[in-house]
Image (tube, rainbow, N blue to C red):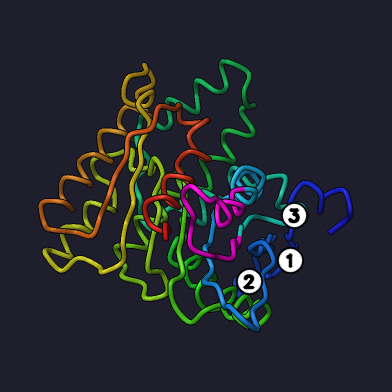
Amino acid sequence: MTTMWQGCLADTDYFELRSSGGHHYGVWVTTPPSYDPATTQAPAVYVLDGNWAVGMTAPLIVTQKDPMQQIQPYIQVSVGYAGEDAQHWARLRNRDLVPPGEPIAQEFVDAVETGIRTGAMTREEADAYLAELQDTHADAFLSFLTAELHPRIERDYGTAASGHGLFGYSYGGLFSLYTWLTGNPLFETIGAGSPGVVGEDSQIFAMLEKLGDSLPAAQLHLTVNDQELLGDLAVYQNLAKNAATVLHHLTARGGAVTSTVLRETHVTGLQASFLSYLRTCRAR
């Protein structure tokens, strides 16, 4: 990392990794202040949407030195896209973060059409964005994280053997819920910020029904934003409503789940949601 970027993202390395499926990922690894794996090994916390999230979440590594509310040591691994794919991260995430067979809610399509009318995206961009939702592979991306990326992080950064975490926001939050419901043994804590469960026919509800009362042991922390629920955008209203429904299902079955309503919008809630996850799941 150049001197300029090192000043912005202290103690952060960057490398690129091509998955066995042929996808090109960028990975930012931020280590704790004064980290020395020879004396103290820290677990990894994987943060999704690295192209967007790394600048807002990686600096929070300093919470490990906060004298008022200290967070347990962790290595942050922010995962995004590299090369030409980095320019298209906002649509490629649909492919990687959405569960296989997830229906495309009409409210989501309507939100994309609104983006065209307001000039936020072109018709070509919108079509490409929606096309990625036609064939989604959260299962393949989860396999990449656990079977390809984690062994490299474990080898190169001397991580602890246990205590690893996962945080995702929006569709990343949907991926977090999906991962939690699969019972993947790598992650002991999972943060799902404003999870993108937009439709009542989401695969998340099907997975919940299939699990019955046998819920995963990992701790799940779920956040939503008050402006999603109180605002006038149907896609965010549905997201907040369905997140609450998921939460009620889980708490009724005694799941290891906590939750918080944040005073944010969907766009501004990322950093606050990550901090809420750290304070709830990783406090000393």
Q: Is residue 126 above or below residue 94?
A: above
Q: Which residues are magenta?
A: 60-77
Q: Which mark is residue 19?
A: 2
Along the polypeptide, which appears first: circle 3 or circle 1? 3
Asked if residue 248 lies left or right of residue 19, the reply is: left
Label 3: element kind? loop
Q: Which residue is found at the position 50% from the left and 20% from the top?
A: 114
The residue at which mark 1 appears reads as 16
Q: CA distance from mark 2 to mark 3?
A: 27 Å
Along the polypeptide, which appears first: circle 2 or circle 3? 3
Q: Which residue is found at the position 17% from the left and 63% from the top?
A: 210
Label 1: element kind? strand
What residue type is disc 2 on?
Ser
Q: Is residue 188 above or below residue 253?
A: below
Q: Nearer the viewer, residue 143 or 214?
A: 214
The mark lying in front, picked from 3 and 1, is 3
Asked if residue 204 lies left or right of residue 272, the reply is: left
Residue 122 forms part of the magenta stretch:
no
